[in-house]
Structure formats: C-alpha cells, structure tokens
Image (spheres, coloured by chain):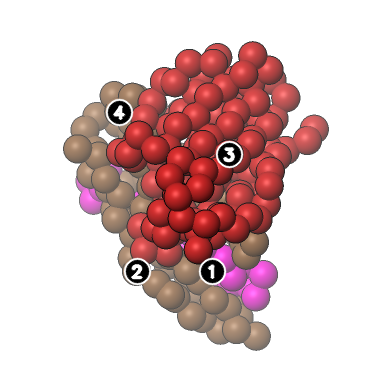
Chain colours: A brown, B red
Amino acid sequence: GNSVTQMEGPVTLSEEAFLTINCTYTATGYPSLFWYVQYPGEGLQLLLKATKADDKGSNKGFEATYRKETTSFHLEKGSVQVSDSAVYFCALYNAGNNRKLIWGLGTSLAVNP
Amino acid sequence: KAGVTQTPRYLIKTRGQQVTLSCSPISGHRSVSWYQQTPGQGLQFLFEYFSETQRNKGNFPGRFSGRQFSNSRSEMNVSTLELGDSALYLCASSPSGGGTGNTIYFGEGSWLTVV
C-alpha cells in the first residue's frame, strides 16, 4: 500500500544552518507529494507541493524535488531562521487511494539563535 | 476570506462521557476531513465528508462518528470517551477533497483532554 516515511526528530539547528528533512514514500502509480508545516499552537498549512516526477516545489526559501527514481521528496532550506521552528509533515496523495492523504509522522525542527 | 473555524478550542471531559466538536469550513468548500493528532501516532485520518455524505473513513472504532450539514459545516462525535482519546482533533476543508492541485486547509484544532 501507500506509505510515507520521514526522518525522526527532533532536529535542532543553529540559525543560518542548512536544513534537510528526509522523506521517502511507497506508492503505486504517480502520487502527488506535499510538505505541510505546523507552527506551535496552530493547525497545519501547506508549505509546498509537487505533482509529477522531477517537479520542484518551493516556498519561503524551502525546496523539495520529486524524485521518482529514489522515491523521495526531501525538504531543504539553505539558511534556517528561528521562525522556521515548527513540525514538518510529508504527505502523499494517490488518486487510486480513495482520495486520502497519507501522512508521515512529522519531524520537529527547533532553530536556536 | 475566513479560514477553517473549529470550536471549542479546548475542552476537558471525563471517561465515559461523550463530546461533540464543530468545524466550519472555508466558504465554498464542500469537503471536510477530520484528523486525530497525538505525539505517539502522528496524524491519523478519521473521516471525510463531501456534500453531506461520508466519502472516506479511517481505522477508528464506531465510537467516532461525524456528519456534515447542508451548509458544509461538520461535527464529529466521540462517545464513551477513553483516556487514549486525548488528542488534538483537526478539521480540514477543501473545494473537493485533498489531491492534485487541491490544497487542504486546516483549522487550529480542538484540544481534547480526557481525565
């Protein structure tokens, strides 16, 4: 079946450090892939998405490239800020999966000044 | 336009009681999904409603139920509460359901504590 695996957290970085949060998936066909972010005390919000292989999603300095050959959608940012401290969720949608989003467990990021 | 609104934001219930949570989706959105979020289990899909019909259901016991009204507002109900039901319950809306080109928008959630 479909599944998403994220690297376990928490991840702790200093401001301006490089960030990578790994996400790999298992799915049949051609799923769409998403990164959602949850800031403290808030609901989740879409950070970026990619709908086909080799697409790159980007937003707020974050990027992720849909790699079908490695079934990955790793999230990266070149220089993190304290305000990026949040929980990041990788998710996939597969049209053959009854329209359900499949979620990773989330990775907590703490950025220290 | 207004976002997804969930009420109440915080509540404390006793084991054995029941609880009803409410969600008002973004105007024009017809799909409402519910999720349970806990530290150990992450984000678990409960169910999705579209035009007053349950379209999808996760793997939760029958104590968890929901409904959607003609104005797309949705409620979920948990009966015979257990300690393990303590969680953040998130509602999400979208025009027609999560999927390609279809962002889902989350509310801030309802924090339920069962004592």
> Magenta segment, which residues?
A68-88
Q: Is residue A112 above or below residue A8?
A: below
The residue to which callout 4 is attached is A97
The residue to which callout 1 is attached is A78
Label 4 near label 3: C-beta < 8 Å?
no
The residue to which callout 3 is attached is B20
Name which residue lies at 68% across and 17% down.
Answer: B71
The kind of residue on which mark 1 rests is Gly
Q: Is residue B8 left or right of residue B32?
A: right
Mark 3 and mark 4: span between their CA atoms?
29 Å
Dot 1, crowdedness within 10 Å: few (<14), some or many (≥20)? few
The residue to which callout 2 is attached is A8
Which mark sits nearer the N-terminus, 4 or 1? 1
Which mark sits nearer the N-terminus, 2 or 1? 2
Q: Is residue A63 magenta?
A: no
User: Can you give x and y, in whole percent of width and height, for residue B77 in the image?
Assistant: 51, 36
**Which element carries disc 1, helix, strand or loop?**
loop
The chain letter for the residue carrying disc 3 is B
User: Can you give x and y, in whole percent of width and height, for residue B68 in the image?
Assistant: 57, 22
Which mark sits nearer the N-terminus, 4 or 2? 2
Position of the C terminus of chain A by quadrant: bottom right
Q: Is residue A83 magenta?
A: yes
Q: Is residue B43 above or below residue B73?
A: below
The kind of residue on which mark 2 rests is Glu
**Which element carries disc 3, helix, strand or loop?**
strand
> Which residue is nearer to you in this view: A22 or B29?
B29
Mark 1 and mark 3: span between their CA atoms?
44 Å
Give the residue furthest to the right: B1
Query: Are discs 3 and 4 located on one and the same chain?
Result: no
The chain letter for the residue carrying disc 1 is A
